[in-house]
Image (tube, coloured by chain):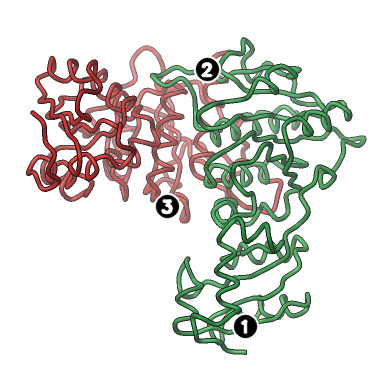
Chain colours: A green, B red
Amino acid sequence: MIISSATNERIKNAVALRSRRQRARTGLILVEGETEISRALAAGLAPESLFVPVGSHPRLSSACRRLGGTVVEVEGPALDRLAVRGASSPVMVAERAPTGLDALPTPGEQSALYLVVEAIEKPGNLGAMIRTADGAGIDGLVVADPTVDPFGPNVIRASLGSVFSMPTAVATSSDTIDWLQRRHVTIVVTTPGATVEWTQADLTGSVACVIGAEHQGLSAAWLEVADQSVFLPMHGVGDSLNAAATAAIILYEAVRQRSR
Amino acid sequence: MIISSATNERIKNAVALRSRRQRARTGLILVEGETEISRALAAGLAPESLFVPVGSHPRLSSACRRLGGTVVEVEGPALDRLAVRGASSPVMVAERAPTGLDALPTPGEQSALYLVVEAIEKPGNLGAMIRTADGAGIDGLVVADPTVDPFGPNVIRASLGSVFSMPTAVATSSDTIDWLQRRHVTIVVTTPGATVEWTQADLTGSVACVIGAEHQGLSAAWLEVADQSVFLPMHGVGDSLNAAATAAIILYEAVRQRSR
């Protein structure tokens, strides 16, 4: 099938998925970019349709067909309307993965490492954190009290598609705390008010590292239930780091401690 | 002085400083936001003019006048045109600080820590790195072979104004390598091809941590002169982290080693 009209229903429906409300209504998401789509398919996401410039991306197209998706070749105005990231970029519509807390693996005989991000506001920050969490090999991510959709286009892009292979839950802080405590996961919060440096906390057991929002930091709910509060020393004029930088430092401190 | 016209010369000249070319031509920069302006003035930047909504920001205004700057009150269309970050946000035009390599402190009796970022492309990444470098208390930053102006509005914002107190040089990689080697600074590069983990390098002496560009990584010039090459383990589907996350992990590893 080749589509060139920008007002074709399939094109319109795909583009509409840039809106969070439309993603929530349909249970579908929009994935842009070759790396991101490959990682989504490798992680088991069910493709609905793949839009590629006419004659391009044969390998992605076969992978999509094999998994039951429709491949649509696009050109002209249809391509222009779809391809936010450049005219050669493929775009996929796929089913959203479930994001209940039961999407997370529970701690087993090996100790587990989780990242909880509370009320993060910037898609780029959330995506960068997911990319770092993927690198650190954590077991699962919770987006608590979300203001950003972890399957929005900018998060997917900043995570380079690693969000698809990362077990990800979206939940209230209250439900997340309950889930962690029932499984005896140590809750470690990073907050400027702490008195213990980040390297002094034991991050080798089953641990959830909890990072607060860009401006407000962590809510009282998390500060109250924390088993351990740590801070990063601030030697300059600023009093905090970017949330994604904080997450990177804490997660790789956990990697350092766990590799010893 | 109160200005309400959006076509007033002062307003036009200030807005024009959003363009990198205009900043280079005039030697002036544009600083937006209360925190950022306060930090610029505290760091000794010379203000040319401060634009504030009529009747607002009395403290900033006195500080600006004391340092020889003109305070301009703005309202209506003039305010709308200036205030990208919201109608209550002040905007300052100031002289650009010098950014030759001689702007950097040289290693003294205490060992020095530098961050070198090569050809970083995203202002948000550069700004986040500067904010982290400020937190880590490093002695100086070099933007090598720059594609981004470290005094552009988005870098200033992402650094929360910490770029002004950070000794910052803009130089070619070749000149930077020469500067570091003459001063016997150990060059530590982070690259996926290394065989030594980031925690195994000695970061306690006079060290320059060198981070490559988002897509291309480090150029051969840096890889060849490196005294030490380190990598961050990648336990997930991705093969690298975001450049700002990498810088954060390396710099705080240096902080950890130096505090022992």
| Residue A171 picture location, percent across and down | 74, 40
| Residue B143 picture location, percent across and down | 33, 40
Residue A60's quadrant in the figure?
Answer: bottom right
Q: How many marks?
A: 3
> What is the residue that sits farthest to the top in this orientation?
A195
Helix, strand or loop at disc 1? Answer: strand
Q: Where is A58 relative to B184, above or below?
A: below
Front label number (3 vs 1) = 1
Q: Amino acid at mark 1?
A: Val
Q: Which residue is mark 2?
A: A233
Q: Which residue is mark 1?
A: A72
Q: Residue at x 61, y 56 (%)?
A: A21
Seen in the image, is A90 located left or right of residue B217?
A: right
Q: Amino acid at mark 3?
A: Ala
Decide which of tag 2 and tag 1 comes sooner along the chain.
Answer: 1
Q: Residue at x 62, y 49 (%)?
A: A149
Q: Which label sits on residue B220?
A: 3
Q: Nearer the viewer, residue B112 or A50?
A: A50
Q: Chain of mark 2?
A: A
Q: CA distance from mark 3 to mark 1?
A: 42 Å
